[in-house]
Image (cartoon, helix red, strand yellow):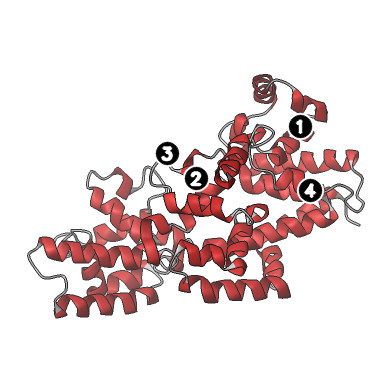
Amino acid sequence: MLNTYASYQLITRDIDKSLSRVQKQPLVDRETKYYLDNITKVKSIDEFVNNDRLFKYAMKAFGLEDMAYAKAFMKKALKEGVSDPNSFANKLSDKRYAEFVKAFNFAAYGSEATVYNKAQQFTAQNYATQVELLGFDPKSDAVKKETAYYLTNIVKVKSIDEFLSNDRLYNYAMTAFGMDPKTDNKELMRKMLEGGVRDPNSPANKSDETRYKAFVGAFNFEALGESATTYNPAQQPATAKYFRQTLEEDAGKDNEGVRLALYFQRKAPSITSFYQVLSDPALAKVVRTLLSLPESFAQADIDKQVQLFEKRLKISDFSNPKALDKLLTRFTTLWEIDNPSSPVQASLSVLFSQPVEYGVSTNLMLAIQKMKS
């Protein structure tokens, strides 16, 4: 059996190939095909939650598989959405729930939640609004004809060049965002689209004209590539998350340390404080191992734990690929010393299924109890 370091490196050396192997597993392939064939047919929260096969796939994708039984709890989260900072999902300490609700955003998109795409529905809705502002009937035959053409053909567009070269689609899109294709030249729009919206200093983000940012956000070729006009949070991201979750679970069957390393690698770029680390038992275990701290240290005062972590580690290293790789090399080496490679003895459920909190998730448990009573 390979040791922890070698197993981790074997998987991450070509992560795409590793994920591809997972995707080809008969069970994963079968469940994914079922999911993609059926998720777009779901038009309501009840339909979604009551289809066990779809719902469990989605919950696993977001690391919430062990909460798939709590349907009333999840319905409440889905109904309140994430637009309001005080919504149920947003108030939970475990941010996986807000991520889940954002992906299956019935509260915002209603029956279109599982097919919603900014380049499609959002743009068509904007077009109707703009037409009405110009004094035309948004239900007229001419508008219907243009919208039908747009929705049929925009999904075929795979690049900025294709988008800009189709005047009928481009003009429709520009009109939808309150811009005149005759005055806003294509080279300017190409510059905006190529810069995207991920970089705060991109042309669209730096422009005083907010419509550019909205337009580029809807036709986000810079971030999504050829999937920009078909990208749907309830489809592609969910399946990609499912594959990664399965990859980590499979690795954990042979070596708990490999699963911990893969999990930390995935989560690390989004970590902004050591309080986040301590709120996740799996992340905290990696950091304690890195610093050669005993398990008993987890019982120490939270603030004191954070102070020690801050003295010995840089939070910025977690979002630096080279620095992160060095940290995980150290982790897998130290893990192997303390846990010589052998079949996993302990269950990983405590680390990976309990809600993210300092210890036990009190707000989550109380919420479930209140719903039962």
Q: Is residue 94 left or right of residue 297?
A: left
Residue ID for mark 2? 89
Query: What's under tag 1, amino acid-wise?
Result: Arg
State which tag comes first along the sequence, 3 or 1. Answer: 3
- Residue at 30% x, 43% y: name it: 206
Which quarter of the figure has residue 29? bottom right
Q: Which structural element holds mark 2?
A: helix
- Residue 70: percent from the left, percent from the top? 61, 53
Residue furthest toward the front?
A: 373
Tag nearer the camera, 2 or 1:
2
Quarter of the picture holding the N terminus: bottom right
Above or below for 371 versus 179:
above
- Residue at 41% x, 72% y: name it: 158
- Residue 165: percent from the left, percent from the top? 28, 73
State which tag comes first along the sequence, 4 or 1. Answer: 1
Query: What's under tag 4, amino acid-wise?
Result: Leu
CB atoms of marks 3 and 2 within 8 Å = no
State which tag comes first along the sequence, 2 or 4. Answer: 2
Nearer to us in this view, 281 or 335: 281
Residue ID for mark 3? 86
Residue 319 appears in the picture as rendered: no
**Alpha-carbon distance for marks 2 and 4?**
25 Å
State which tag comes first along the sequence, 2 or 1. Answer: 2
- Residue 233: percent from the left, percent from the top? 47, 61
Query: What's under tag 2, amino acid-wise?
Result: Ala
Q: Which structural element holds mark 4?
A: loop
**Alpha-carbon distance for marks 3 and 2?**
8 Å
Query: What's under tag 3, amino acid-wise?
Result: Asn
Label 4 Cα neighbours within 10 Å, binned few <14 / some 14-19 / many ≥20: some
Residue ID for mark 1? 288
